[in-house]
Image (cartoon, coloured by chain):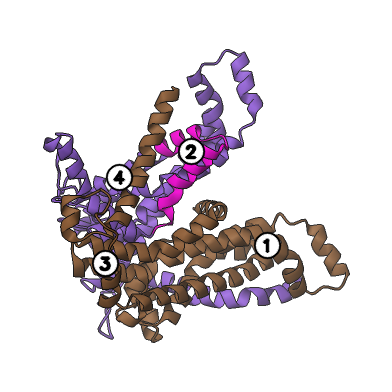
């Protein structure tokens, strides 16, 4: 049994590690070297592919677009959702329940269901080929899950804390800032990480709304490399590595929060 | 009445509600309205065609039906293997030792990558000429197993399903570990006193106690299988010959390749209905199995 367990764990580890190592190694190879030595260590650590991809493509621009879209989408989603989660938790009677249901209903609807009217709306508003358009849509579609996670957490804050603050004359805004937010830091961190992974990696909305190079985010740019470079895996994987780097660095340092965040998000329906 | 007491709280909801209404509620309702028209997405006018789109999707559209069955095949494959693997590995890694924590973090790693990156990695593995998988098979003298993994209509959907399992097993494993760690130790002690064997321990203690985690994992895996748009789009675009087309990619092509917005909207509404039915059925089944235990 013990041997079986070790063998299984090792096989799974190899299945994860080998492809990831191959990606890293391949970025230092030429196409002919990949052909002759598919999984092995590269002959030399040449940075030709890294130079070429930056010469060939506005990589810095794609990268910045991804940073801008992710930064604003995550922070604004967290801000708006925490306000709503707070209000829902504090509201008396059935009104809070109604708002909670209205917002969390959004988790059930796959993005492809409303993408056609959404495309039309974004087009009519003149927000195609604009980072602002992407950010506004991102906020709207990820609010449901953010509200779901944060309101679950805020409900567990003892009511007596709010009562006490109220007796001291605190307004709702003051209670939101000084009681609810400081006590919800773990759930806010989990939500932010979950959204970070989602927005950084999203393909659908850039695919729908962006056609000009100067507004492309990394996943969309990568997808189009496929058409340009076909099976030039060294260049494709250099793109993959650059696109994944921020996420990997964040994962190494914030591992625990990643696990908490992605799991919290996965509890949605 | 509650309204007065809630007044200042409404202001908290307003900014988010405006965006949510504009970019989520209105488009979702519009999808239903479009579905009764023949709009092509380009011309300013359209005709209302009643249920014609729905009738055509359900009776006449062999590609949509194929996409539906592909989606079911894909879902069942992922559901079985992802749930099984994540549960087995969670049971292996239940204790919080250093090695176990490291392995959990390693297995979880693919989850943070974008679908496009994962698609490229697996296109490289499946490449018919120079791919990793065929090269490995050659070196093991198993040439007869060589395949055009993404080009063979009969297996392409399963090749992508394997990728999906690789992509998300680590995530489900974490949910199971949390569930397993919450099982009170004394239940196992009681089982031991009663002389329970390993399998009995699993059947009568572990399984009933992790049913809530299993519900979450299976529900999430199902939904994920229907949302695998990014992965499939980046790997095969639904080809060859629609053999990897799922509902989500089909709707995209109908709308943005053929510009049949009205017709694609009817497909979307049916898609939403399918998801709703599957979700309800799944929760019923799992609830029933729990009561039985």
Residue of label 4: B162
Residue of label 2: B286
Mark 1 crowd level (few <14, some 14–19, many ≥20, 10 Å Cα): few
- The answer to whether marks 4 and 1 mark residues whose Cβ atoms lie closer than 8 Å is no
The mark closer to the camera, 3 or 1, is 3
Range covered by the magenta-colored residues: B84-113
Please give the chain letter of the residue carrying mark 3.
Answer: A
Q: Residue at x 63, y 21 (%)?
A: B189
Please give the chain letter of the residue carrying mark 4.
Answer: B
User: How many angstroms separate mark 3 from mark 1 (CA)?
Assistant: 60 Å
**Badge 2 element:** helix
Please give the chain letter of the residue carrying mark 1.
Answer: A
Residue of label 3: A49
Residue B167 located left or right of residue B232: right
User: How many angstroms separate mark 1 from mark 2 (CA)?
Assistant: 29 Å
Q: Colour of chain B?
A: purple
* Residue B280, percent from left and from top: 46, 47
**Badge 3 element:** helix
**Badge 4 element:** helix
Q: Colour of chain A?
A: brown
Quarter holding the N terminus of chain A?
A: top left
């Amino acid at each position: 049994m013990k041997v079986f367990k070790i063998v299984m764990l090792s096989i799974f580890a190899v299945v994860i590690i080998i492809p990831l190592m191959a990606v890293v190694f391949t970025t230092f190879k030429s196409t002919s070297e990949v052909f002759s030595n598919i999984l092995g260590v590269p002959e030399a650590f040449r940075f030709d592919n890294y130079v070429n991809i930056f010469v060939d493509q506005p990589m810095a621009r794609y990268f910045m677009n991804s940073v801008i879209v992710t930064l604003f989408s995550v922070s604004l989603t967290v801000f708006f959702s925490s306000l709503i989660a707070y209000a829902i938790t504090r509201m008396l009677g059935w009104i809070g329940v109604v708002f909670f249901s209205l917002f969390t209903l959004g988790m059930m609807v796959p993005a492809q269901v409303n993408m056609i009217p959404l495309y039309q709306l974004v087009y009519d508003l003149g927000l195609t080929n604009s980072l602002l358009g992407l950010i506004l849509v991102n906020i709207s579609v990820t609010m449901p899950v953010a509200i779901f996670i944060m309101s679950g957490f805020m409900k567990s804050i003892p009511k007596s804390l709010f009562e006490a603050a109220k007796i001291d004359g605190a307004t709702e805004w003051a209670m939101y800032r000084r009681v609810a937010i400081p006590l919800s830091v773990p759930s806010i961190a989990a939500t932010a990480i979950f959204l970070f992974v989602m927005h950084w990696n999203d393909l659908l909305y850039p695919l729908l709304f962006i056609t000009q190079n100067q507004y492309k985010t990394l996943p969309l740019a990568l997808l189009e490399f496929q058409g340009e470079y076909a099976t030039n895996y060294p260049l494709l994987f250099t793109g993959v590595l650059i696109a994944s780097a921020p996420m990997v660095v964040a994962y190494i340092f914030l591992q625990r929060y990643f696990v908490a965040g992605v799991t919290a998000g996965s509890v949605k329906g | 009445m509650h309204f007065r007491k809630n007044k200042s709280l409404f202001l908290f909801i307003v900014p988010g509600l405006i965006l949510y209404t504009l970019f989520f509620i209105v488009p979702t309702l519009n999808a239903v309205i479009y579905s009764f028209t023949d709009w092509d997405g380009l011309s300013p006018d359209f005709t209302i065609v009643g249920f014609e789109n729905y009738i055509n999707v359900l009776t006449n559209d062999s590609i949509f039906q194929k996409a539906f069955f592909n989606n079911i095949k894909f879902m069942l494959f992922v559901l079985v293997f992802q749930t099984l693997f994540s549960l087995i590995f969670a049971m292996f890694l239940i204790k919080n030792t250093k090695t176990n924590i490291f392995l959990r973090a390693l297995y979880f790693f693919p989850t943070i990558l974008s679908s496009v990156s994962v698609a490229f990695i697996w296109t490289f593995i499946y490449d018919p000429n120079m791919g990793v998988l065929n090269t490995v098979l050659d070196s093991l003298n198993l040439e007869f197993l060589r395949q055009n993994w993404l080009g063979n209509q009969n297996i392409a959907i399963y090749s992508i399903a394997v990728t999906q399992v690789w992509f998300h097993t680590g995530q489900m494993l974490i949910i199971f570990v949390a569930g397993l760690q919450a099982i009170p130790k004394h239940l196992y002690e009681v089982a031991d006193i009663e002389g329970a064997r390993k399998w009995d321990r699993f059947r009568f203690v572990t399984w009933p106690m992790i049913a809530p985690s299993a519900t979450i994992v299976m529900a999430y895996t199902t939904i994920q299988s229907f949302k695998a748009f990014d992965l499939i789009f980046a790997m095969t675009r639904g080809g060859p010959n629609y053999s990897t087309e799922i509902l989500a990619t089909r709707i995209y092509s109908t709308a943005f390749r053929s510009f049949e917005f009205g017709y694609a909207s009817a497909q979307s509404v049916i898609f939403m209905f399918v998801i709703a039915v599957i979700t309800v059925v799944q929760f019923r089944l799992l609830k029933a199995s729990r009561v039985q235990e």
